[in-house]
Amino acid sequence: MSPDNSRPAAPRRIEPSAAPKKVSTRSGGRRRGPWIAAALVALLAIAGVVAFALLRGGTSVTGPSDDEKIRTSIDTFTTALRDGDLTALRGVTCGALASFYGGISEVDFAATHDAAVASGTVPVVESVDTIQITEAEPPDQTTAIAQVTARTEGAEPSARTFDLALDGETWKVCA
């Protein structure tokens, strides 16, 4: 081999590029794309369920339920009985009770109420325990039976029932 008389090469400087390369810091080289796609699919499914419920009217329930209305009617009826409020009794009753309260004079009712109070036979409802509603198509009437725990003066509480009927939007006590 012949001796190399050339000079060694001088060092050469390499300038950095204008935009440095980004180095991934993720472990294992996993990508976020599938997770984002799964999250979007889940959000679309939830939005679909909400839209379906809104279109069907599932969340449009407003005002008191029938159970609450029945409880209110029973409370109004028993309060009117206790207070001797004939006008309220005429407004909250139906059927035979409405006929009775509608046909009795104020004087006769006052005498009957006074006698009931004196004998301690005016019932006090302690709780409304169960309500069963029977839906009916017009011209039939929607009715309900409510079982309550009630007592009269000096007596132990006992189970009693109220028969009610739906009159428009108002539940009325029939028996």
Image (spheres, rainbow, N blue to C red):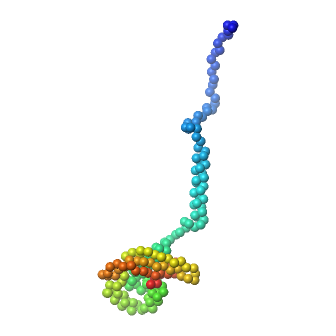
Work out which residue is located at the far right of the displayed protein and give it.
2
The quadrant of the rendering that contains the N terminus is top right
Front-most of residues 76 and 139 = 139
Image position, residue 47 (x, y; %): 59, 58
| Residue 31, placed above or below residue 150 | above
Q: Is residue 91 left or right of residue 54?
A: left
Q: Is residue 168 left or right of residue 78?
A: right
Image position, residue 115 (x, y; %): 34, 89
Q: Is residue 109 left or right of residue 5?
A: left
What residue is shown at x 53% (from left), y 69% (from top)?
Answer: 61
What residue is shown at x 64% (from left), y 19% (from top)?
Answer: 12
What residue is shown at x 48% (from left), y 76% (from top)?
Answer: 132
| Residue 124, placed above or below residue 30 | below
Give the image quarter of residue 75.
bottom left
Image position, residue 104 (x, y; %): 43, 91
Query: Can residue 102 be seen at all in this image of the molecule?
Result: no
Give the image quarter of residue 9.
top right
The quadrant of the rendering that contains the C terminus is bottom left
Front-most of residues 172 and 131 = 131
Front-most of residues 102 and 122 = 122
